[in-house]
Image (spheres, helix red, strand yellow):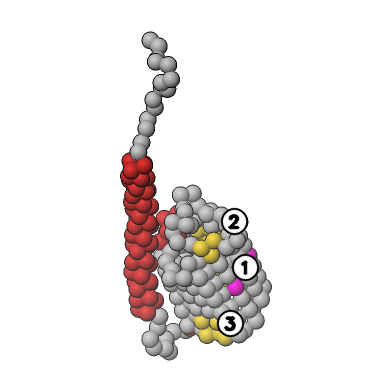
Amino acid sequence: MTMPEGEQPRGFRFSIRELLLLTLLIAAALGWRHSSERSARQLRDLQRRIMHAHTAILSDKMRENTLPKNKQPASRKGLDQKFSDLTLDGVNLQGVSINGDDQLFQRATLVNCNLSGTTLAGSFQCARFDGSNLAGAKLRGGGSSFQLSSFADVDLIGATLQGGGSSFQGSSFAGADLTDATIICSGTSFQAVKVDGANFQGADLSRLDHGSLESCYFQEPPTYDERTRFPVDFDPVEAGWKRKE
């Protein structure tokens, strides 16, 4: 069939009004999708904040209930009496090896100390290392070895933290520098840990359970970089961590 001379084939034709209407519909659809995705992100962030706040309250309450309110009874004898609840401030213990078996260093306070290159093994449950230098140190233990301990503002650059059971459960690393540190904790041993503002640049976290890492809580996001190694199935962006370039 031939077309009449001078007549051109007709495709889809729209009026200016129809084009404007179509543009508005597409813009509205894209805007709704963007708004929906943003709302979903905000909801996940709110849920994460609520979970972190709840975990913080429980952890603080556990620390408060565990820390001693009075002096230990005078009847306690031997090494247990000597080191449990020990307080050291600003002492140089660089490179030493400390074994805290049998709860010898439970609730010990070693703040602002030089513990670089040390090996700490055994039970330091509820101990405080705030402000100390633990660069290159090796922290090892099982059971509840470092459970509910505080490493606030501690230098843990290049340190190795290793344990099972509940070894670091409920501990605080608020403001700690864990640059190039290696954390090898199985199961729930790194669960409900406070990582407020902690620095994990270059750290190897790949051998942590992703669920335990997701349970770590904070108000100020912990930081990481392209060298930080995470466990499979853990998304630092989704968890609210902050990447440093």
Q: Is residue 45 visible?
A: yes
**The disc label shown at residue 226, or none:** 2
* Mark closer to the observer (2, 3): 2
Label 1, secondary structure: give it. Answer: loop
Does the magenta-highlighted stretch encompass residue 156? yes
Question: Dot 1 corresponds to which residue?
Answer: 157
Does the magenta-highlighted stretch encompass residue 27? no
Spatial distance from mark 2 to mark 1, Cα to Cα?
17 Å
Q: Nearer the viewer, residue 216 or 2?
A: 2
Q: Nearer the viewer, residue 220 or 140?
A: 220
Is tag 1's residue or tag 3's residue first in the polypeptide sequence? 3
Is residue 216 shown left or right of residue 98? Answer: left
Q: Nearer the viewer, residue 103 or 205?
A: 205
Label 3, secondary structure: give it. Answer: loop
Spatial distance from mark 2 to mark 3, Cα to Cα?
31 Å
Is residue 96 shown left or right of residue 217? Answer: right
Three-letter code, disc 1: Ile
Is tag 2's residue or tag 3's residue first in the polypeptide sequence? 3
Residue 236 image point, x, y percent: 48, 57
Spatial distance from mark 1 to mark 3, Cα to Cα?
16 Å
**The disc label shown at residue 16, or none:** none
For the point 55% across and 82% down, the residue is 111
* Mark closer to the observer (1, 3): 1
Residue 202 image point, x, y percent: 61, 60
For the point 46% across and 79% down, the residue is 107
Q: Is residue 69 above or below residue 183?
A: below
Categorize mark 2 by other alpha carbons within 10 Å: few (<14), some (14-19), many (20+). few
For the point 43% across and 69% down, the residue is 218
Q: Which residues are magenta?
A: 155-159
